[in-house]
């Protein structure tokens, strides 16, 4: 028998960048949170401030192994997200996406919990359709260095839709576009954290290629608003749903903006472009906008200020 009326929510990858913000928001709205993480790319420090909360529990566990717990809802975020991290052990990356999805879907099936999947714009690969709408099937290299991540996430989407059709599991598949903010790992190699850390240290800012490739950057608070709105929406909205900020910048423009904001002696230097690096990326967010009324509110300049403040404090400590 249930003693409490609180929702018991499982967040896998909860000690990561996005997961830690999600745990915080769920607790603040009154949920019980079970954070599961194997600390592959996340750190305990990200959730240290939640440890004193009696409604928060941290469990070290690898989602490629079965997990038997009683929950009402699941957010499946476990998976390294930055190219440096997911390419370090590519076999484990695919296992995390695929075996992790099977285990969490098995758990959702048994407990009748609704389950959210953190999918990615990488399912569109190096897209020839711009901006990317959910109806676009993508252009992904199945055998390249990004494939462990891209194809792992694509297979996870397949599993989500098959568990939905075959077993009636309530799914919510979100395709997340580049997101940034406090608690990104300073060494995970993603462009926003790299440029800010380099500028704060007065080091060269490393632009891969000529910097003409584009990305569209969403501030983390906006993204989490989108997660919660989607998860709380009626069951027939299963996705996939793009969540991101549609304002597009070249990587060169991002570098200039960070350098202007931080100041200091850094110079822009150009390095080789990694293989299969998508040339352009911008979400078409009309589906989430029309169905849930969600749209990002934080402009890049505003979000970068908050992120620079975070890294300045982190580097000082
Ligand atoms: P992150 O690397 O900071 O967080 C991922 C977390 O998952 C880490 O805490 C890591 O230790 C944990 N993890 C990895 N493998 C695990 C395993 N086998 N078992 C248990 N835990 C494991 O990355 P993030 O940016 O917070 O991304 C979270 C999710 O969102 C990922 O699934 C990622 O693919 C997705 N996503 C993020 C972005 C973005 O821009 N941040 C974009 C698209 C998709
Ligand atoms: N599983 C889990 N927790 C649960 C229920 C299932 O981790 O509470 C795992 C289980 O180990 C299995 C996977 O989820 O390998 C898929 O479960 P499902 O019931 O779909 O498949 P089956 O057990 O029939 O292979
Ligand atoms: N990038 C860059 N310098 C860096 C890190 C990344 O120019 O120090 C580029 C990278 O080649 C890519 C873009 O910035 O074109 C975004 O990279 P990130 O790894 O953040 O995300 P993803 O490529 O997965 O969108």
Image (spheres, helix red, strand yellow):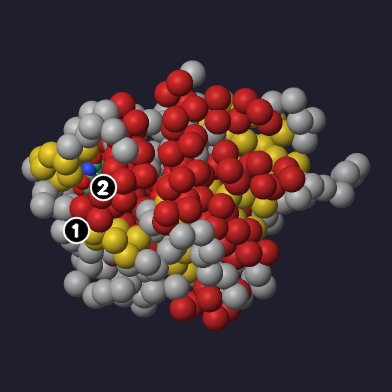
| Quadrant of the image occupied by residue 316 | top left
Q: Is mark 1 within 8 Å of ligand 3?
A: yes
Q: Is residue 242 visible?
A: yes
Task: Please give left or right for residue 63 compared with residue 196 in the image.
Answer: right
Determine the residue positioned at 31% across, 46% down: 260
Q: Is mark 2 within 8 Å of ligand 3?
A: yes
Distance from disc 2 to disc 1, alpha carbons, whole Å, reads 12 Å
* Mark 2 touches mark 1? (CB < 8 Å): no
Task: Kindly identify which numbered label has been placed on residue 245.
Answer: none
| Quadrant of the image occupied by residue 214 | bottom left
Q: In the image, residue 53 lies at what x, y percent?
A: 76, 30
Determine the residue positioned at 25% across, 55% down: 253
Task: Kindly identify which numbered label has been placed on residue 213.
Answer: 1
Q: In the image, residue 8 lies at what x, y percent?
A: 74, 45
Residue nearer the viewer, 246 or 116? 246
For marks 2 and 1, give the one nearer the viewer: 2
Residue nearer the viewer, 213 or 302? 302
Determine the residue positioned at 38% across, 31% down: 186
Q: In the image, residue 176 lies at what x, y percent?
A: 43, 58
Question: Within 10 Å of the Cα at label 1, are there few (<14), some (14-19), or many (20+) other Cα atoms?
Answer: some
Question: Within 10 Å of the Cα at label 2, are there few (<14), some (14-19), or many (20+) other Cα atoms?
Answer: many
For mark 2, what is the residue? Answer: 255
**Dot 2: what SS?**
helix
Q: Earlier in the sequence, mark 2 or mark 1?
A: 1
Q: In the image, residue 67 lies at what x, y percent?
A: 59, 36
Above or below — where is 219 with respect to 136?
above
């Amino acid at each position: 028998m249930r003693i409490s009326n609180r929702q018991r929510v499982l967040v896998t990858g909860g000690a990561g960048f996005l997961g830690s913000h999600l745990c915080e928001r769920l607790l603040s709205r009154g949920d019980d949170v079970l954070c599961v993480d194997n600390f592959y790319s996340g750190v305990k420090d990200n959730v240290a401030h939640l440890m004193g909360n009696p409604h928060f529990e941290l469990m070290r566990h690898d989602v490629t192994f079965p997990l038997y717990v009683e929950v009402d809802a699941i957010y499946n975020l476990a998976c390294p997200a930055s190219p440096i991290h997911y390419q370090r052990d590519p076999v484990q990356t695919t296992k995390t996406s695929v075996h992790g999805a099977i285990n969490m879907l098995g758990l959702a099936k048994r407990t009748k919990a609704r389950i959210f999947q953190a999918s990615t714009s990488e399912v569109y690969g190096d897209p020839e359709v711009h901006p990317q709408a959910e109806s676009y099937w993508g252009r992904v290299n199945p055998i390249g260095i990004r494939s462990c991540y891209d194809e792992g996430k694509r297979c996870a989407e397949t599993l989500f839709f098959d568990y939905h059709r075959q077993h009636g599991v309530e799914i919510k598949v979100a395709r997340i576009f580049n997101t940034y903010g406090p608690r990104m790992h300073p060494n995970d190699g993603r462009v926003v954290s790299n440029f800010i850390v380099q500028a704060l240290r007065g080091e060269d800012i490393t632009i891969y290629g000529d910097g003409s490739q584009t990305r569209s950057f969403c501030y983390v608070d906006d993204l989490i608003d989108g997660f919660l709105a989607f998860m709380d929406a009626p069951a027939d909205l299963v996705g996939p749903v793009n969540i991101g900020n549609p304002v597009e910048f070249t990587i060169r423009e991002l570098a200039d903006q960070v350098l202007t904001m931080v100041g200091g002696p850094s110079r822009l230097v150009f390095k080789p472009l990694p293989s299969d690096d998508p040339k352009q990326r911008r979400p078409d967010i009309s589906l989430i906008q029309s169905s849930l009324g969600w749209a990002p509110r934080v402009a890049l300049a505003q979000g970068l200020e908050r992120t620079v403040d975070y890294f300045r404090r982190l580097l000082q400590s």
